[in-house]
Image: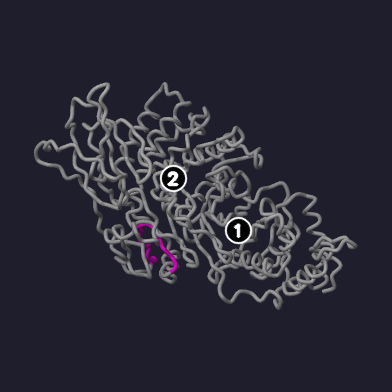
Amino acid sequence: MKRWDHNMKTADGPPPRPPLPKRSDGNVGDVTSSITKTTSIYPSLCMTTTTLDSEHHSSRPLNLNQPLIMSKIKPSHTIKISQELQSFHRKFKDNVTILFEYEFLPPSSSAPGTSGATNAFQSGGVSLSCAKQISSQWRNSKYVKLPHQSENTGFLSFSVVSSKKNKRFVENSSPVKKWDIIKTELAKLNDFITGNEHLDVTQVGKKIHASVKTYNHKVISFPFHVLNDCRVGRKLQMTFSTIYSAALDMENLFPFGMPILKKHEPKTFFLTQRQVRCILANGFLSTFPKRESVPELPNINFYKLFSATSDGELERKIEKTLCILNYFQMSEKHLDKDPPLLLSFERRRLPYSHPDWQNSRALMSNVEIVEDQGIESAHDKLQVDFANRFVGGGVLGNGTVMEEIRFSISPELIAARLFTEVLDDDEVLIITGSTQFSKYSGYGDSFKFEGPHEDKKTLDRDRFGRRTAQVAVMDAYHFRPYQVDHQFEKKFVYRELNKCFCAFNPHRNQEHIAPIATGNWGCGAFNGNLELKFIIQWMAASQAGQRELHYYVGWEQGESIMKVVKSLGPKGATVGRLSEALKYYNDKEMHYSPFKRRKSLFQFLENYCF
């Protein structure tokens, strides 16, 4: 496989003295240019540099005697994959993308010489040229814009001071690769944070903010108050070198670029844990360009997580940031596996031949109530994430409810925000292989980081080299207060049934059909009815091959659930009959009458004649 590098072009002798550039109109285009070694051509002047985007700029001192860092791309490490993953990739090559260079492991009976390194980034089963692919991705809506791409450019501006009363503002006429600015700024930050024994940790946030705004003008309006916290600062001092080195691995780990999991296109991406950490490190440092210009993708840059406007918001964001820093602190020992651990991100879409719910004869599956435990403890089950249609919801914002907590204690899930477009009504995302790194307590405003999490049960691998933990990211319908009574209508019930079935229905080649670990999905801020959401998930699990449903709720609610489950069993309830019962309940009970007290759904089902 061919590699390429970005070598500096330097003149044999000292560069000629160029004239001062004229100020341009400030418009930044997607222009690519090589960067030459720069020496100080105005030794008597004090100069400040700024990278200019189309709207904002910020200033920061730069020593022009020091050239911008330009490093060669190192050969990436070839990953050994299992024979099962090799066969799976070959069988479903149009829908499975392996985003790293891998080596086939032939069966022991195979002839020698049948293994070899392969460029696994494929489109339609055809291997593409690395250089050609990278150069054509910047304007292609099917690919993520990455910080190390040559088209990611900005302008350098200079405040030129010849005396105390004479100051002029000029702008470099040639665009500069932002990746070189990023590397220079991060190197300075790493020296400042990790090489200073007497570091004032309450000033770390200001220093990081000053560096990040040189290459990402969006952060100017978001001061990093969270990073000035003493606990966060101490964690940063221990982990920043890891974040720094992981971020700069981008050009080494993603030489093929990064495609997008597009809406209505079922596909599966395989990444290594090291690649996922690289994504999170660049997100932490807010290096990803032009994210706000793609409304279908959630933001992956962390700068909003580090800014707070109230004490309550500040405390919540500090606890989430501590979880993420704990991940970086613990990640190194998890990367020392051979072969490396893999993660997969599968975008599923409900097939056109979705279930005929009203006429289904599928029998109801078993139900088990689990009390006083979180869904994340169900290592050997399909764990339901009570999701937002934008994957991760408010994990990088103000949220600290179910999804945000789940993503904070398992930050590898956050990487999906880089490349997963908003979920439609008939789509879910299945993430396999993530690890829980942090313990926590509380919920909402009481959420707290409680230290590192170690669990040997999660160390088992499946046949593809992933950890067995599997998370189903599926969003419930958000009912506004005036819509609450409408959720029993057929169109909304079927929407939720189809969403659950899409997540619960196993693949034909899936070996182990695990139980489903879920709870009050869509019942908090989304205003779902507790009893209706249980019946919907139970029906979908039953339709998906009678998968066991493990329901994680409190004792009182668990008792009422088991009561209705036991009452429906002897009546021979099926998915189709329950569908008819829901329709009848909506027609009979949900229409307002001042002379009748409305029955709950469970009360109605216990007396319903099947």
On the image, the x and y values in percent for residue 448 come to 61, 37
Q: Residues within 10 Å of mark 1 (few under 14, many from 20)?
A: many
State whether the magenta stretch is mostly helix, strand or loop: loop
Q: CA distance from mark 2 to mark 1?
A: 24 Å
Residue 520 visible to the viewer: no
Report the side of 376 relative to 14 (left or right): right
The answer to whether 383 is drawn above or below residue 43 in the figure is: below
| Nearer to the camera, 418 or 341 | 418
Q: How is the image coloured?
A: one colour
Residue underneath mark 1 = 475
Name the spot of residue 548 as percent of width and height, x first. Answer: 68, 63
Label 1: element kind: strand
Name which residue type carries label 1: Asp
Q: Is residue 106 magenta?
A: yes
Q: Residue at x 75, y 61 (%)?
A: 485
Residue ID for mark 2: 283
Question: Which residue occupies the foreground of this view, 591 or 368?
Answer: 591
- Near-viewer residue (92 or 78): 92
| Residues shaded magenta | 95-108
